Image: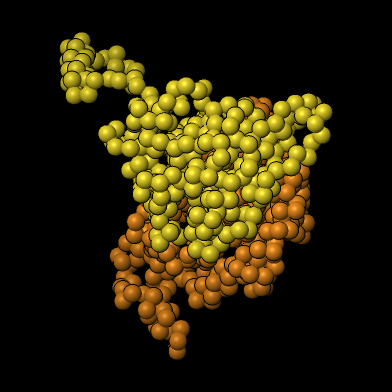
Chain colours: A yellow, B orange
């Protein structure tokens, strides 16, 4: 290979260089190079709504109403194994160990099992689907039964899902499960049936401290846009590059 | 639901509430295990035909039929585990190509239809024609159908059989690699799961597949020779042992490399995986897979490379080594599939898994899926006995 190149005539070299330069010039005229990297992936159409979620950990009091309302609104089994939305109680002890609990997803509220003097800090983290822009769950569905709606919401077509559970394995946040009755994948829809009618998702409707909001990331006047601008928000597991659209204010580094 | 409450009480640390139940059980352990046996047996067959290792001739047809018997079963545990098995065909109708699982149906069918069935058909065509003339009754009819109406056994036609069969085997080698490397990718591409997500996964799957397939053919050859009361071709057995030793070394090295790499890099997931290996997987990984399935067979086969004891010592030791390898590779699949679901993706705790006896996902059903390919193989050997084939 190297020998051959050496033997190429100068004329050939100039010809190739010219051709290469020409091609680069032509393509750059078509599509100028742009190094823009979107924080969360890219909306399909910036003129339409593209939803994200904001959760303010500092406001969450761990009442578990969100998890409870979610189950009631979406008719989810009351058994403690299926949750579209749940709350975790984090307790960092003074010795540095972490204790996390979410009894029945927090629906029945919390009690603190660590004695006060051993607590370094404690807080609640509400969890739900991150509605990722580059969602691993929709990526791996072998039949395309799970998909992203134009509004950026990850949904499942239960009439099409074959129940292979590959998406459950692929979700890094544990937000999916196989529905015990339909035997298909199930997850948070951001109460799609409500938000398309102009209502709030059930979990947000009932939150007494207004700790969770959802909104259009394209709307520069919107509440979520303002929330993200005014707070130092973090997403869960950013290294996995899932394009999570669930932004937490006050997220501690212990949270996964 | 009752068993989920039992598991809930056994949760160690914190796991996400949806992680109590394992999504994939014993059936998904069997799927890569059986697929691996297919790929491995086929690769052993191709050693004889493509790479001209003529001493392996006595096991060539056995390896092909073994591959076919197991391939026919490979997809069944997978389909039966689905929430909606009747929707399985959707994967062929509307595959979603960004999914690592989407092309499994095509890879499987390609391997079954374009490689294995064709190769076996070309290889047996002359015998099918002859047997259809010699036998009587139902067998005669089956052979007739299997000839597909092609009854020309002139030397020219046979030459074509040989040529086409050879070409298919050559295509079959990368296909077998594809088949099982691909199965590894299904796990290896899940970035959410650090136990699975490694670029080594397809390679490890492929090598362990070769190890298990070679061991299976060795095992079957010894068993069938015993049943038929014929003498085992020791040169052939030694050669298989040699290849098994070689591939086992490669497999062991790469799997160890994968673990060493994890330990040295000690990323975010290191602590939980360390607890997994030294806790929940102690027996299945360190003892069953590592010691029994790898180290002991390596010592036996390695010892034969240094000094070859007499036949009556070698035979039982080969039998032991191949059985142990088959046992060990099963637990390799177990450790990947089950092990990968025992720890929480929060990296803060563990759920547990107990294999039930009854039910679609139970022990007896798994045993059935494991016995079925052997039954199919017996049928194939009855119908297409390699030892009754015309020579030449």
> Residue at left 67%, top 49%?
A108
Q: Position of residue B361 (x, y in %)?
A: 62, 64
Residue B298 visible from this viewpoint: no
| In the displayed structure image, the side of residue B38 where residue A193 appears, left or right | left
Q: Quadrant of the N terminus of chain B?
A: bottom right
* Residue that protrudes farthest toward the front in the picture: A208
Q: Position of residue A56 (x, y in %)?
A: 54, 31
Q: Position of residue B85 (x, y in %)?
A: 47, 66
| In the displayed structure image, the side of residue B120 where residue B263 appears, left or right | right
Q: Quadrant of the C terminus of chain B?
A: bottom left
Location of residue B151 (image quadrant):
bottom left
Q: Nearer the viewer, residue B338 or A173?
A: A173
> Residue at left 36%, top 75%?
B147
* Residue that protrudes farthest toward the bottom in the picture: B137
Q: Nearer the viewer, residue B75 or A211?
A: A211
| In the displayed structure image, the side of residue B217 where residue B303 appears, left or right | right
Relative to B82, is A229 above or below? above
């Amino acid at each position: 290979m190297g020998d051959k190149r050496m033997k190429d005539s100068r004329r050939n070299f100039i010809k190739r260089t010219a051709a290469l330069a020409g091609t680069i010039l032509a393509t750059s005229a078509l599509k100028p190079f742009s190094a823009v990297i979107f924080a969360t992936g890219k909306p399909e159409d910036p003129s339409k709504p593209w939803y994200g979620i904001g959760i303010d950990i500092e406001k969450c009091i761990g009442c578990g109403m969100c998890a409870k309302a979610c189950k009631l609104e979406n008719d989810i089994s009351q058994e403690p194994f299926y949750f579209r939305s749940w709350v975790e109680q984090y307790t960092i002890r003074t010795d540095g160990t972490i204790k996390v609990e979410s009894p029945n997803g927090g629906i029945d509220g919390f009690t603190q099992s660590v004695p006060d003097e051993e607590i370094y800090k404690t807080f609640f983290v509400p969890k739900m689907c991150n509605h990722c822009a580059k969602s691993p769950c929709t990526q791996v569905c072998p039949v395309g039964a799970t998909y992203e709606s134009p509004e950026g919401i990850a949904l499942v077509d239960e009439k099409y899902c074959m129940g292979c559970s590959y998406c459950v394995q692929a979700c890094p946040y544990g937000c999916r499960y196989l529905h015990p009755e339909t035997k298909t994948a199930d997850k948070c829809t951001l109460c799609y049936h409500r938000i398309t009618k102009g209502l709030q998702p059930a979990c947000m409707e009932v939150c007494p401290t207004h700790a969770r909001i959802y909104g259009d990331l394209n709307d520069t006047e919107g509440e979520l846009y303002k929330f993200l601008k005014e707070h130092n928000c973090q997403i869960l597991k950013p290294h996995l590059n899932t394009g999570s659209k669930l932004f937490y204010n006050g997220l501690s580094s212990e949270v996964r | 639901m009752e068993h989920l409450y039992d598991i809930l009480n056994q949760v160690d640390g914190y796991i996400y509430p949806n992680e109590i139940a394992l999504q994939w059980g014993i059936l998904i352990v069997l799927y890569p295990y059986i697929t691996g046996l297919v790929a491995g047996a086929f690769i052993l067959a191709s050693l004889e035909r493509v790479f001209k290792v003529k001493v392996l001739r006595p096991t060539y047809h056995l390896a092909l039929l073994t591959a076919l018997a197991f391939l026919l079963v490979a997809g069944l545990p997978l389909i039966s585990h689905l929430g909606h098995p009747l929707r399985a065909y959707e994967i062929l109708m509307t595959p979603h190509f960004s999914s690592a699982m989407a092309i499994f149906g095509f890879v499987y069918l390609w391997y079954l239809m374009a490689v294995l069935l064709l190769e076996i058909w070309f290889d047996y065509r002359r015998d099918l024609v002859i047997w259809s003339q010699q036998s009587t009754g139902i067998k005669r009819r089956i052979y007739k159908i299997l000839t597909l109406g092609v009854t020309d056994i002139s030397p020219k036609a046979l030459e074509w059989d040989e040529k086409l069969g050879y070409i298919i085997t050559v295509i079959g080698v990368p296909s077998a690699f594809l088949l099982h490397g691909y199965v590894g990718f299904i796990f290896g591409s899940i970035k959410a799961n650090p136990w699975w997500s490694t670029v080594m996964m397809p390679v490890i799957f492929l090598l362990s597949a070769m190890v298990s397939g070679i061991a299976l053919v060795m095992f079957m050859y010894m068993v069938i020779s015993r049943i038929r009361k014929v003498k085992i071709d020791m040169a052939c057995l030694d050669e298989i042992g040699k290849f098994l030793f070689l591939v086992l070394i490669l497999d062991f090295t790469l799997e160890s490399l994968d673990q060493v790499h994890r330990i040295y890099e000690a990323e975010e997931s290191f602590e939980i995986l360390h607890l997994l290996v030294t806790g929940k997987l102690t027996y299945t990984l360190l003892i069953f897979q590592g010691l029994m399935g790898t180290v002991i067979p390596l010592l036996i086969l390695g010892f034969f490379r240094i000094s070859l004891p007499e036949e009556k010592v070698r035979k039982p030791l080969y039998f032991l080594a191949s059985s142990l390898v088959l046992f060990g590779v099963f637990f390799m699949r177990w450790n990947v599939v089950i092990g990968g679901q025992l720890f929480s993706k929060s990296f803060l705790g563990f759920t547990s898994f107990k294999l039930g006896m009854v039910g679609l996902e139970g022990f007896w059903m798994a045993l059935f899926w494991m016995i079925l390919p052997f039954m199919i193989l017996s049928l194939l050997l009855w119908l297409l006995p390699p030892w009754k084939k015309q020579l030449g």
